[in-house]
Amino acid sequence: MKNQTVREPSTLLSFVPIIVLVCLLAVTIQIYGNDALSGGSQIVLLIASAVCCLIAIAYCKVKWEVIEEAISKNIADLSPAILILLIIGALSGAWMISGIVPTLIYYGMGIIHPSYYLVSTCIICAVVSVIIGSSWTTIATVGVALLGVGQALGFSPGWIGGAIISGAYFGDKVSPLSDTTVLSSSITGTPLFTHIRYLMITTIPTMLITLVIFTIVGFTYDAASTDQISTFTVVLKEKFVISPWLLIVPAVTLFLIIKRVPAIITLFLSAIAAGIVALIAQPHILQEIAGSDTSGVLAQFKGVLTSFYGSTAIDTGNAELNELVSTRGMSGMLNTIWLIICAMVFGGMMVASGMLMKIVTVFIRFMRNTFSVVTSTVATGIFLNLTTADQYISIILTGNMFKGVYKRKGYESRLLSRTIEGSVTVTSPLVPWNTCGMTQSMIMGISTFVYLPYCFFNLLSPIVNIIVAALGYKIYKVKPEEEVEVDKPKAEKS
């Protein structure tokens, strides 16, 4: 029997799995709301994958072995990212339980001044988000506290929400603890810290412009009260041992990052160091986590291990702070990992069937120079945020769609990873039906359309990425189909 010739799918047919994915996600989000990532979105991805597989085998005549190989390769390529996400879960729990994060929050809140409420709010949310690597947690905890203060000071909900989200998503972009940062770097094959350093070229100017706007606007408001912030600092001081000595761990972590120690090693050492600090500085917290059925050395050991892998809840006497100091550990990363694996299955099938490349050709027509390449990527990322309603899926699909294009055109992978962050991550909370938009709107009690015009960091990020691409600043060409050391560019500037 003769081997069947593989048939190329049409452009219209190639969009069918994407359309199925978008429609089912819309229904899933309508049904489950903020819990869509707990399983519904993952199942939808597998259903869309099945549709893609059916078309690939029945119409395109692609063998199952080819599809299976593409899926396996996709998942294998993300193995380091999955390991990093698990270590980040352990690190975030250890940093909180050891008192490192409470110490940073305590000192950070001390700098707030009513006359500079908006800019202080943006800075505090940025610092906390960088530390814990989660915009959602920052907004749900510190952001909610600052929201109450802002309302008492007479600021409109839109301005408050804009300051909170701008700061939180700045941290979400540049923190090595952020799952979206890890995902963006991994999906494009860019080393994590290389990705973060390259991000600074567009992120810092965007943040500075944002802070200037909030500072100017803040001058028009009168000071009133900071009682809620004072309550937070008092409760933190009572519950945790707060000391500048605890900041040695983040300082050493920063040193390792600057020295370009591999991300997995840096994050692992930081987590272990935080666990040791917890044993020394917060034995009462470890005892509370371990429970009354264990005591002594065993309780301390159990408390540290639990903070690494599991969920912890500490009673501070303040409901908002209880939410802030609770941790999820490695187990808290499992939904994200599950989503990534299912998305990789979908991406692998789209690649093996030839559908993904067919869709990419639609955008390639407009790619003639650096400006058009970056602009097309930004437009695609925002489009996928609008259509798939989830930033993780949008990051993965955008990375898969353009990774090969950037390599063939001789662009470094870090340009793609930065562009994805500057288009997908930051715009996700601006879409009302996106999981991020729904979550932030619900947490703050502010409509997405109300805070959207004031999220200057999120609105400006895609624009700044396009402007930097147009200027060609720090954008280097490499040999097509090859990757060189991106930290030491030697080729000509584009």
Image (cartoon, rainbow, N blue to C red):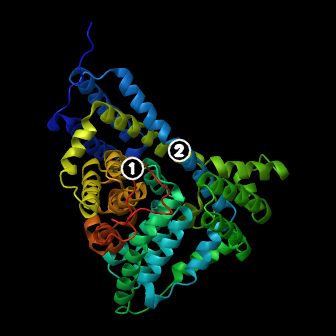
Q: Quadrant of the N terminus?
A: top left
Where is residue 142 drawn, in percent x and y? 50, 70
Residue 440 is tagged as none
Q: Quadrant of the C terminus?
A: bottom left
Type of residue at label 2? Ile
Where is residue 277 drawn, in percent x and y? 75, 62
Instruction: State the image quarter where residue 421 is shown.
Output: bottom left
Compare marks 2 and 1 and give the one earlier in the sequence. 2
Q: Residues within 10 Å of mark 1 (few under 14, many from 20)?
A: many
Helix, strand or loop under label 1: helix
- Tell me the residue at 32%/36% (across/down): 351
- Tell me the residue at 52%/67% (across/down): 130
Residue under label 1, please give it. Answer: 392
Where is residue 287 drawn, in percent x and y? 76, 55
Type of residue at label 1? Tyr
Q: Does the rendering let one see residue 319?
A: yes
Residue under label 2, please give it. Answer: 82
Left or right, 194 with reference to 394: right
- Tell me the residue at 35%/21% (across/down): 64
Where is residue 188 drawn, in percent x and y? 42, 50
Q: Nearer the viewer, residue 234 or 252?
A: 252
Helix, strand or loop under label 2: helix
Q: Please, is residue 41 above or below residue 98 in the view?
A: above
